[in-house]
Amino acid sequence: MNSTPSYKKFESFSYKSLADLKQKIKELRLEIPISLKTEILKQNVKIKERTIPNRLSIQPMEGFDSNLDGSPGKLTFRRYKRYAKGGAGLIWFEATAISQNCRSNPHQLILSEKTTNKFKELVSFVRAISNNSLKELGFKKKCLLILQLNHSGRYCRREGKKYPIRAFHNSDLDETIGVSKKDGIVISDEELENLEEIWVNKAILAKEIGFDGVDIKSSHGYLISELLSSRARNNSKYGGKSLENRACFLLNIVKKLMKELKNDSYFFITTRMSVYDGIPFPNGFGVKSKESEVFPASIDLTEPIELIKRLHDNGIRLINISAGNPHYKPQITRPHDTPVKGGTLPNEHPLYGVNRILNLASKIKSQIPKDMIVIGSGFSYLRQFAGHVAAGLVQQQKVDICGFGRMAFANPDFPKQIFQDGIIDKNKTCITCSQCSQFMKLGLNTGCSIRDPQYQKKL
Ligand SMILES: Cc1cc2nc3c(=O)[nH]c(=O)nc-3n(C[C@H](O)[C@H](O)[C@H](O)COP(=O)(O)O)c2cc1C
């Protein structure tokens, strides 16, 4: 008799109808709600003095198509034009480096004095197009644009080579990207102090450029995300046993920014956070402390919830919940049917992965103050039915806004399709083939090689 529980068995997407999907959800005993009332996604959301016109967001997706100086390039404009036409109420711009030295790719965007004008051009271009499409769809409010600011941390590259800038040593993570302890550095407290200032200045620049908010990125194993779990960082005010220390880099930036911006209720300071990274204790965040050998580790949201409450105390009212470190266990961040080349199929059902990431957002939402707006992630696996799950989650108040990543590459008109037809076009959806991630891994422009002619080259 085979005793492997069914949620551990990998199975690719084969659901022809919502009924098929519902049946599988029931069989696997998952908590993925489904609603046919997708019009709920047309409701607006108020945050402080602003209103987001609807419940759909484009998640940040690195395109690696900047000019060499880090300014938005031709393909960057093309991608954001496609998003803007789609009708999402919130466009979360991709991981943008706070300086040249913390880029993960020579074509990653950089926010700097040099790139300011091109960013301004991009922001007004996107606003004009999105205002128009939102109006056509019947929305009265305008789209909000948020810029994600990042330091790539252990995924930095310099002069074409991997140059990990770590919060602490972790040989397992070194191995996943083929570097050794000798490569790169562990960042010093002095450098982190300097970075706090740079981050604050870049966030202010983002406001001057015309963004509606700035995301101090704390997800996916990049610098801040890694600091949150840096128990192994010894003799440092930014690491060690206490969450106070591990979170102080993020909190310092937030506090300084709030002060500089005088708690401006029209501009949002936010963060995209991996509230659970799946890395076993003591090197993981949001994981149980008793199980050092379990892969991926079990979830314990005590620290993430405490941190989000602290962010709320400091005036933050919008949080984008993600999970995982995609360089380590990609299925936690983005459940998929096909891994990147050389990757292995996860030994879990992809719907179980969808359930985990959606549930993380709803568990967090249920335990933090009600006026913190929560964005959930991990919808693209659900293909044409993603809008129905989004509607189910919003209806049950499990998340406030539903953010789509890979779907936006494949089918940037997905919001329009949900609003007008009640369902995403099944012939245009993301098929979670991981080719966009493969492009990323190879350092190429990222996009959808299945649905977008611009990227249809075989890998
Ligand atoms: C090619 C690629 C680039 C990504 N770039 C970013 C990024 O810049 N910032 C970020 O927070 N997440 C990034 N992500 C993660 C996505 O925003 C999203 O969380 C993930 O794909 C899961 O959502 P989905 O199921 O809707 O795709 C990226 C994912 C992919 C595949």
Image (spheres, grey):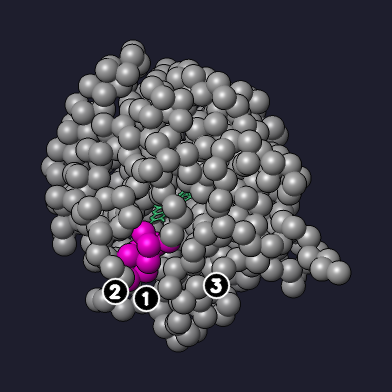
| Secondary structure found at label 3 | loop
Q: Which residue is mark 2?
A: 158
Q: Residue 95: which disc?
A: none
Mark 3 residue type: Thr
Q: Residue 344: which disc?
A: 3
In the image, residue 375 above or below residue 73: above
Given this view, does label 2 or label 3 mark the residue nearer the observer?
Answer: 3
Q: Which residue is mark 1?
A: 163
Residue at (43% x, 61% y) in the render: 434
* Labels 2 & 3 near each other (Cβ < 8 A): no
Residue at (14% x, 44% y) in the render: 118
Q: Position of residue 322 (x, y in %)?
A: 54, 48
Left or right: where does residue 71 sit relative to residue 55? left
Q: Position of residue 135 (x, y in %)?
A: 28, 17
| Secondary structure found at label 2 | strand
* Labels 1 & 2 near each other (Cβ < 8 A): yes
Alpha carbon separation for disc pair 1 and 2: 6 Å
Mark 1 residue type: Tyr
Given this view, does label 3 or label 1 mark the residue nearer the observer?
Answer: 3
Alpha carbon separation for disc pair 3 and 1: 25 Å
Residue 444 in which image quadrant: bottom left
Q: Nearer the viewer, residue 252 or 359?
A: 359
- Pointer 1 or 2: first along the chain: 2
Callout 1: few (<14), some (14-19), or many (20+) C-alpha neighbours within 10 Å?
Answer: many
